Amino acid sequence: MFDSPFDFLTLVIAIIAIALAQKAMSQVSALRRRLDAIEGAGAARTAMPPPLVPMPGFEQAPPMAPSASQPPPLPEPPPILPEAEEQPAASAPSAAPPPLPQPAPGFEETLGTRWVVWIGGLTLALGGFFMVRYSIEAGLLGPGVRTMLGGLFALALLAAGEWTRRKENISSIAPVPIANIPAILTAAGTAVAFATVYAAYALYDFLAPATAFILLGMVALGTLAAALLHGPALAGLGIAGAFATPILVSSDKPDYWSLYIYLAIVTAAAFGLARIRLWRWLAVTTIAFALLWTFPCLACGPDLIAPHAFHVIAGFVLAALLVVCGFMFGPEGSGEEIEPISSASLAAYLFGAMLIVLNSFHADIAMISFALLVAGALFVAWRAPAAVGAVGAAAAFVFIVFGEWAVRSNAEMLVLPGGAIPGIGPAATDGSVSLHLVTAAIFAAAFGIAGFLAQLRFATTQVTVTWAAAAVFTPVALLVTLYARIAHLDRSIPFAILAVLLAAAYAAATEALTRRGERPELSPSIALAATGALASLALALTFALEKGWLTIALALVSLGTAWLSVQRPIPFLRWLAAILAGIVVLRIGNEPRIAGDAVGTTPIFNWLLWGYGIPALSFWAGSHLLRRNGDDPPLRIVEAAAILFTVLLAFMEIRHLVNAGDVYYASAGLTEVALQVCVTLAMAIGLERLRLRTGSIVHNVGAVLLAGFAGLASVWGLLVLENPMLWTQDVGGSFINLLLLGYALPAVLALLLSYAVAGHRPPSYGNSIAAGALILALAYVTFEVRRLHHGPVLSRGATTDAEQYSYSIAWLMFGVALLGIGILVNSQRARLASAVVIGLTVLKAFFIDMSTLTGVYRALSFMGLGIVLVAIGWLYQRILFRRQAPPPVPQAEG
């Protein structure tokens, strides 16, 4: 049915335009019925296109002078009052009742009076186009005859449209809600006229460029004038046909200069019509169609960059002149407000220019054109606040252009699962580094200076923040991309110096804006300027320092940001300190050794101490400064980073010490687990004390997490995975050995932690920690007895009667010692622990000693246990629960 996909596309576009116009025509019909009901007259009225819902700046269309063929407009009818409120005057004669409202048209009426006419108009236009194509393919008519016939057909359609319009106006019959036949005929005529002139110029060379330009301009102006008379239906169909004409009437050798000159004229006519009638939809549709015509450049060579650049530049200029509110010939602006269409129109053509730059591999003409449009966006936004949104879009597109340029020459920056992208590399990149350096410097200066001066020019927060964000983001982003492209992510002192200068500029801007603090709308801009200063300083450290020093530097910058937030109470600075802390945390997640292989083998005093210790101190100091202004999420993030780096410092140093500098060692031994448990318990005690002073939920949760980790490490690490009685492990000397480090010291620290939480947490929490301390202490006593009997390797050898008896004696002595401590310090917890130990000893005597011990050891075990139990009973009776003797009863005298 269709010769090519473009034919079907044209039909679809035309149908969409018809659908858009249907609503407008329905509104025309409803307005006519209401006017008939008010006036009660049957005279014909001139059909005026209904105003659409205006956007900001598109509030009201200017009045039009009536033409000679149209009667003067009727006076505005009075408003209709509700039926309950109408009170007829006593002296006024009774008026004739208004005619009843006409019923809504049914399906048959709608089909016969509207859709048939619209489809007929569309068929006329397409028939003319296809007749031209058929004559070309079949060679029936010569080029001159084809052109002449096309022109005559267009004139016939235009004449028919005008005749039907005049015939309808002079008729005395009231208009009914039918399709606008004059508008549809005129739309078909203008579309054929566009195609005829374009074919005469581009296909047959009948017209010189100047002549074609004049004729196409005349057709565009004629379309504009006709749409003023016939309404949005003509505008929709005419614009759709105009933009589809180059597809339907095409050539094997396209001339892009002719195409884009033609599109510029069409765009100017459409924008002019949208401006006069204040039709928002028409401006948006024109921008969308014009942007679609940018994509053919993606399949063209470098010789065709100039016409594509002309296309986006011409569209940008026309949008600035006719669409942007408050600038040149555009609609009136509504104060200092960002208007979506004004900003999006400029951003659309900036996007097209960006595509041309990327597709042409940053050719000089494309880069210059893109720079001109960016400068134009800044200029228009400076004069018209409605277009300030285009400034943000321009900043983003600048970053994309330079970022793509940097990535093309540094393919290793693309960390992809499948490897580098084929074809990406230095060979695929132009070598115009100097052009990019100059362009980047101009962009950075333009965005930075204009963004700062805009804070003094505008008074709306939305506008000032947009300018400030672009002023901060663009120079920083350009510096990063240039560093990646030129320095290849290596150390570079020149780039570090540039970053320091940029930080100084932002700091000066922050101070200058702070002195104007009486303007509340500047607060976000001040925060953004301060952010730019700190971000530039962090970049300077990144450019100048190695990986390990960079981690330290970023942590110090976070501390500096916290201090600055105290001196300059800008809310965003607190978040910036937290963000920098998060960046440092992400860095150690990528490389826990901080400095890589250069961490060193010296115990304690190695890169881990500086790489974790200095950031930990910075975050602790930063959290102290941030706490001065209250508790909030940024403070909690920095506090969490401080705890994390402190814990990681201890753990990493322990691994480094135990494993001879290899922090990636596959397994852990008893020494490492013991040290980690001890350090974790010590830090939990410190956090318990600290949280009582700060009341921080982070310190609270951190203390609980550390205690939980210590408990799990003690159970699974010390008692199961690294238990010296289960696995071969050399524990060392008789008394100064790993048992002391792995079980005795953790037992003492756990006992101290239980006392640290007493009275501040639930009793069950403290009692659980105390029970863990008792288990570790009893394990130490047991392991130490076995060490004395078996030597440094506890898992070897059989258990003798003397050893079994030693366990009972040691447990009894431990239980008695706990009882003595409980009596001396009056600790019920110690006495209960003594009872538990002695109870275990009793169970051991009856279930183990009775069956395994023989001879004198069995007798001594039970004798000793009995003596101890009796002694304990005596202590409880005489010391702890001693009863006072009742006083003697006096004897009566006899």
Image: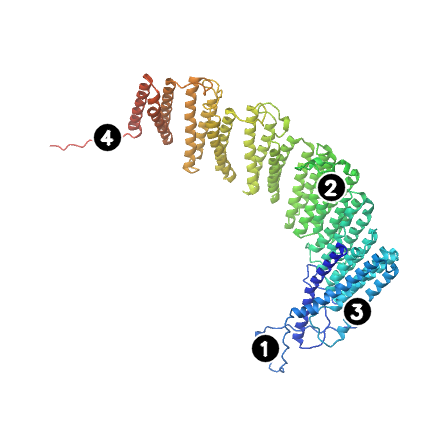
Q: Residue 160 carries which label?
A: 3
Q: For the residues marked 4 and 2, what is the alpha-carbon distance in whole angstroms?
A: 98 Å
Circle 1 packing at 10 Å, graded few (<14), some (14-19), many (20+), is few
Q: Which of marks 2 and 1 is in front?
A: 2
Q: Which of marks 3 and 4 is in front?
A: 3
Q: What residue type is labelled 1?
A: Gln
Residue at numbered disc 1? 87
| Quadrant containing the C terminus in the rendered view | top left
Splitting the image into 4 quarters, where does residue 39 fall?
bottom right
Splitting the image into 4 quarters, where does residue 241 fall?
bottom right
Q: Find residue 856 and report its horizontal and vertical position in percent.
A: 32, 16
Residue at numbered disc 2? 402
* Tag 3 and tag 1, C-beta contact below 8 Å: no
Q: Find residue 274 and report its horizontal and vertical position in percent.
A: 74, 60
**In the image shown, does 720 or 87 lie closer to the viewer?**
720
Secondary structure at numbered mark 3: helix
Secondary structure at numbered mark 2: helix
Q: Which of marks 2 and 3 is nearer the N terminus?
A: 3
Q: What residue type is labelled 4?
A: Ala
Q: For the residues marked 3 and 4, what is the alpha-carbon distance in whole angstroms?
A: 132 Å
* Tag 2 and tag 1, C-beta contact below 8 Å: no
Residue 453 visible here = no
Q: For the residues marked 3 and 1, what is the alpha-carbon distance in whole angstroms?
A: 50 Å
Q: Which of marks 2 and 1 is nearer the N terminus?
A: 1
Secondary structure at numbered mark 4: loop
Residue 536 visible here = yes
